[in-house]
Each structure stands twice: as C-alpha cells, then as structure tokens.
Amino acid sequence: MFIEKNILKTQLLILFLCLLSLELMSQPSFDTDSTIISIFKEQDEAKRLDLLIIHAYDIKYKNSNQSIYLFKYAYEIAKKLKLKEREIYCVYHIADTYYIISSFHNAIKYYKIHGKLAEELNDTTQIAGSYYQLAFSYYKLEDYDKSEKSYLKAIKYYNLLNNMVNVGYCYNNLGLLYGRRDFDKALIYYRKAYATNKKDGGIYTCSINMNNIACMLLYKGEAEKAKPILDSALNLALESDNKQALFYIYGSFGEYYQSLKNYKKAENNYLLAWNLQKQFSYINGIQNLLEIIRIFYEEKEDFASAYYYYKIYIRNKDSLQNINDAKTFLQQEHEEAIKQVELKNREQTLIQKEKEGNYQKLIIIISFLLFLAFGFYFIKRKINIKREKHLLDKKELNDNIVIEKIENKNKELVSKTILLGERNNLIKDVSEKLIECRPNLKKANVEIIQGIIDDLNSNLNEKQWEEFHQNFLNMYPSFTEALTKDFTNLSPSEIKMCTFLKLNMSSKEIALINHMTTSSVEVARSRLRKKLGINNISKSFTSFFAQY
C-alpha cells in the first residue's frame, strides 16, 4: 500500500513538471526590439494604434518589410475601432512602401483600397493622389492603357481642386507615356502640359515641356518648327539656372543639328549636355544621352569616339543591372519576411489554444485522481502529435525554400544568358559596321579600327549555348534523357527549345538568344506543342515539363 502511494506521488510530480514545461513553452516570444515589445504590451488599442503608426513611419525607409507589417497591423486595429482617417493613412503608406521596394502589383492593390476609402470620406485630394500613384505603378508594369486612364482620372479630380501644378505633371507624364509610340498624341499632351504650367507651373516646368514638344517635332521630321521652341526653352532654363533642364535641352539641340548634318554644332551641344550630367544622378537619362552620342559619332564615322562612349554606356548598364538585382533581392527578402511573420502568428495561435487546453486538463486531473494514468498518457500523446506536426511544418517550409531557390537559379540563368546575348549582338553589330567602313579609311586609321575590332572580338563569347546547356544540365541532369525517352522523334533543335521552355522563357527571350525572330519562335512552339501532344490550349509548357 505504501509503495502504491509513492508511485502515485511520483506520477503526480512528473505530471506537474510536464505541465509546467508546457506552460513555459507556450509563452509567446518576440525576436524584435524593445520599442515593438512595448507597443504590443499596450492594453489601450487607440494608444497602441498611435504607437504602431509612429514607429512604422520611422522605419519606413530603414526596414520596409517590418514597416509594412506594422502598418497592416495598425490598419486592422483602425478598422476595428472604425477610425476611417487612420485607415486611409495606413493603407496609403502600405501601398507607398510596396512601391518603394518595387512590388508594384501589391502597391496597386492597396492604392485601390486607398481610393475607395477616400471616396467614402469624400476626400477629393486623396482620391486624386490615389489615381496619380496608380498611374505610376501601372507605368512601371508597362500597362500603358490603365496608366493613361488613371492619369486622366487624376486630372479630373485635380481640376476640381484647382491644383493646376499637378494637372501639368499629369499631362507631361501622359506625353512621356506615349513617347516614341505615338508622336501626335504625345504632342497633344505635352502642349496641354505647357499651357497648364505656363499659368501656374513656373519657369522650370515650362522649359521642360517646351523641350519635350520640340523633341516630338524632331522625331516627326519637322526640325524647322522645333528650332524656335528649343531656343525659347533654352532661354527659360538659363534664366532659372536649372542644370537638369539644360542637360535635356542641350541634348535636344544636338539631335536638331545632327538632323541638319551640322556635326560641329551637334557635337558642341552634346558635349555641353555631357558636361552637365555629373550634376544630377538620373542614370536612365544619362544612358539615353550616351546612346545618342554613340550613334552620332558612328554617323560621323568617328569610331574611336563612338567606342569611348560605348564603353561608358556598358559600364553604366552594369551599374543599372546591379541596382535592379538589388531591388529584386529586396522584394524577395520582403516576401520571405512576410511568410515568416505569418508562420509565427499561426504558431502563437496554436500555442495559445494549447495553453488554454492545458488549464482545463490540470483541473480535470486534480479533480479525478483515479484517471491520472489516462491523463498522463493523453498529455504525452498530445506532445507527440505536436512534435510530429512541427516536423511536418518544418519539412514543408524546407520544401518551399528549395523550390524558391530553384526558381531563383532559373531566373539567374535566363538573365545571364539574355544579357550575354545582347552583349554579343551589340559587339557584332559594331564590329560589322567598323569592317564595312574600313576600306574607305587611310592606312593609319585602318590600324586603329582593326585594333578596336580585335578588342571587341576578344570580348565575344562564342560558347554561349555550350555554357548555357552545361548550367542547365547541372540544374536538371535527367531532363533531356527523360524527355527523349518519352518522345524519341524530337530533333536537336526541338530538344534545345524544350530546355528554354523548361525555364519558362518568353518567345522574345528565346529569339534574342538564338538570333531568330519572335514569329519564328512562336511557329516552333506551336509545332512542338503538337509533337508533344499538348492538345489543351490552356495547359502551359511549364506545367507540362514539371513532370521531367
């Protein structure tokens, strides 16, 4: 009897220790700074909302990922408390932060929510701002029709507000939207921008608008109409001492004189623009000028100067690529952070539910000592289930990480191959043009030109396909063997096409690498679809090749 009592006491002690361990395990943990911990400890939801908004805004540019999470949390509290003005503030900053990290689809989603809330509050300023930002986001995604519609809606509301400065900006951006696609339509919008800014926009905006109008006339071949407009734009820019406006205007003068074959004046204006480029950091504008200057020197048959500016263009292009890679990395980092936050929330919810269940178990065990053994078994079984679930969740997370790594490697392989193809094509084009001009040059110049050609050819990569194919085999070693086993009648060129489609490459990208036209690639894809027996039009090559 004494032994049985000791066994019972021992079981109770073990049970108490197990429950205590579970209690400690169930406490939520925060791997964040003290500021956020103090925010979550605040019991008054209105005060917590204010603290969240302040902290989210403070870290908006330092830690965009965490800022978005905090603004979303604040947005949910504002909805719960029915504070519309706080809701609209949070949603705007969520959208704006997504825009900053180049997550434009998410930015569009929240700008639309922002617009709906602004309409509910009848806030015309916020409505106009929503459409303006939507137009920018659609433009970044190259959805020009939706971008134009958004700008026109923004203009409508800015007119109601009598905000003519922003109306002028919208019209100017619409001109940029059409750019070299439709000169006449671009001219209409640039002229509207100038007419608007002439009243309210100031000297700087007027000089930029006039320069844009002159550029469209030059592209239409109406140089005589462009000249007086460029002169007026230059006078305005000099009057305001605006270096950025002067940069664009001198570049336009260069194009004007080049169209008249007055190479001396064209060169002087291009060099004036080039000397101004160091005073501002708009690298895309600088790249456009470098391309124009290079083409100018080729037309002038000054190939040494053309090559000099070509090398600067390539160096800057590499810098742009690094910037784009950094943006892509930031976006991927953001998406991964959001996944981790959501996973943590799910785990904390499960732990909280388990904690509540453990309290009930403890009361039942104390009340019914006769069922101690069963209770102990039940808790142990619960722990095992939790451990198994944790292992399954961990395995699922690891699988997702592996898939994401494969997708990133695919993108990196395609990006490098396309960049190499573009570089080879450009080097070949320049070399061919230099070779064509060589017979008409003096002997001394021929040697210089030959040196440039050798320099260019030394940078060619003739083993582009071999390197691509080897990298592909490293990633998918059994793909070709498995495919040819099921489809023995595939030709080498069709197998090659299959490798491109396995990486989900577009027709344009495949055409660039293989020196083909896009239409030829589309025909080859259609024939390959029939040969592989993919009769369902809605089924993509990517989903078909997933089995290999």
Image (spheres, rainbow, N blue to C red):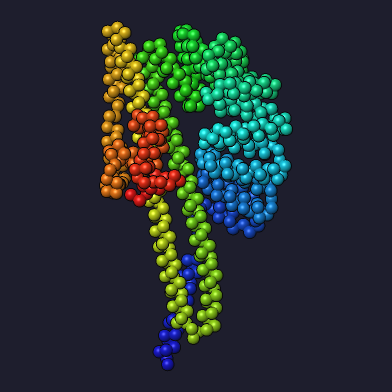
Is 9 positioned to the left or the right of 150 in the image? left
User: In the shown orientation, is residue 116 left or right of residue 403?
Assistant: right
Residue at 45% across, 24% down:
287
Question: Can you give x and y, in whole percent of width and height, for residue 431 in the image?
Answer: 32, 19
What's the residue at 32%, 18% (across, down)?
Answer: 432
Q: Nearer the viewer, residue 509 or 453?
A: 509
Q: Is residue 328 left or right of residue 515?
A: right
Q: At which x and y percent is residue 143?
A: 54, 35
Count of numbered circles in the view: 0
Residue 307 image offset from top left, x and y in percent: 36, 18
Judging depth in this view, the residue of 493 and 536 nearest the camera is 536
Find residue 488 and report its image quarter.
top left
The answer to which of 369 and 261 lies nearer the viewer is 261
Question: Would residue 201 be seen by someone viewing this image from the given angle?
Answer: yes
Q: Residue at x 48, y 49 (%)?
A: 337
| Image quadrant containing the N terminus | bottom left
Residue at image position (64%, 50%) is 50
Q: Is residue 67 above or below residue 437?
A: below
Evaluate whether residue 211 shows in this view. no
Whole-percent x and y of residue 495? 30, 40
Q: Is residue 292 above or below residue 414?
A: above
